[in-house]
Amino acid sequence: MELADEIFKRKAYDEKALIAYGFSQNGGRFTYSAPIADGRFELIINIHGSEIKTDVMELALNEPFVLYHIDNASGAFVGQIRAEAEKILLDVADKCFYADIFKSRQAKMIIDYVQSRYRDKIEFLWEKFPDNAVFRRRDNQKWYGALLTVERVKLGLEGDGRIEIVDLRESPENIDSIVNGKTYLPGYHMNKKHWFSICLDSGVSDEEIMACIDKSYIIARQK
């Protein structure tokens, strides 16, 4: 697998962040170059839609350094080229890309909402469950939500396949009146006296979900 394929796997880019980083834009294509190996070589990154390609040019010859793309090529110099290229690619991934795991419109809305309102980014804590994430308060590290991808049957819902849900906090005295077994469910993998789940893209409005997030955030402060 190409180095870039592994680094940018399941990630999407922020166009404004690419421009701020130093990428040039030509139509829908973004290009960035950086010197490596004491300026004798140049790493080139091309992004067009979902396609991300990298190359290394040997500047003295104005030719691609072909060993960069050969997985079984060995040697100290090849290792140095790859290590320097990887360092730059990881920095680009960190500053210009975000995890593109969740597919439902409302999951993306929630990610944007908690980042813009509370300046919190979702965190992927479990290597074995790459499509599950949490968001928590920065002051006390308490979770106030979790985005999860779950088999419908595990939630007691009809139909096959998986569904995205958000787990949120609620006061115990209100849980029973909220849960309806369809769009609002008992908190999945959480203490069901204090948490409930909302099925995303299933009829609950964005405004209602945002209000529930706000309340969950407040409750997490009190815990």
Image: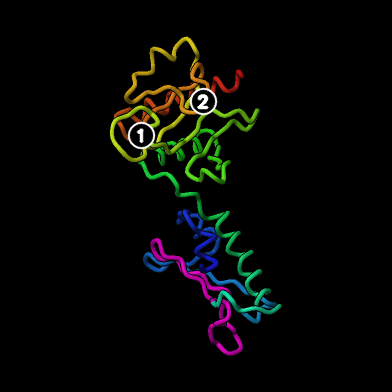
Q: Quick check: 31 above or below 220?
A: below
Name the residue beneath numbered marker 1.
Answer: 152
Residue 198: x, y in percent?
A: 39, 28
Q: Earlier in the sequence, mark 2 or mark 1?
A: 1
Q: What residue range appears in magenta?
A: 43-69
Name the residue beneath numbered marker 2.
Answer: 190
Q: CA distance from mark 2 to mark 1?
A: 17 Å
The residue lying furthest to the bottom in this view is 61
Residue 78: x, y in percent?
A: 65, 78
Instruction: Identify the residue at horizontal 54%, vertical 86% (top origin).
Output: 63
Q: Which residue occupies the foreground of this view, 150 or 213?
A: 150
Q: Quick check: 133 above or below 34?
A: above
Q: Secondary structure at mark 2?
A: loop
Instruction: Identify the residue at horizontal 57%, vertical 32% (top origin).
Output: 136
Q: Are marks 2 and 1 in contact (CB under 8 Å)?
A: no
Residue 3: x, y in percent?
A: 55, 67
Alpha-carbon neighbours of circle 1 within 10 Å: few (<14), some, or many (≥20)? some
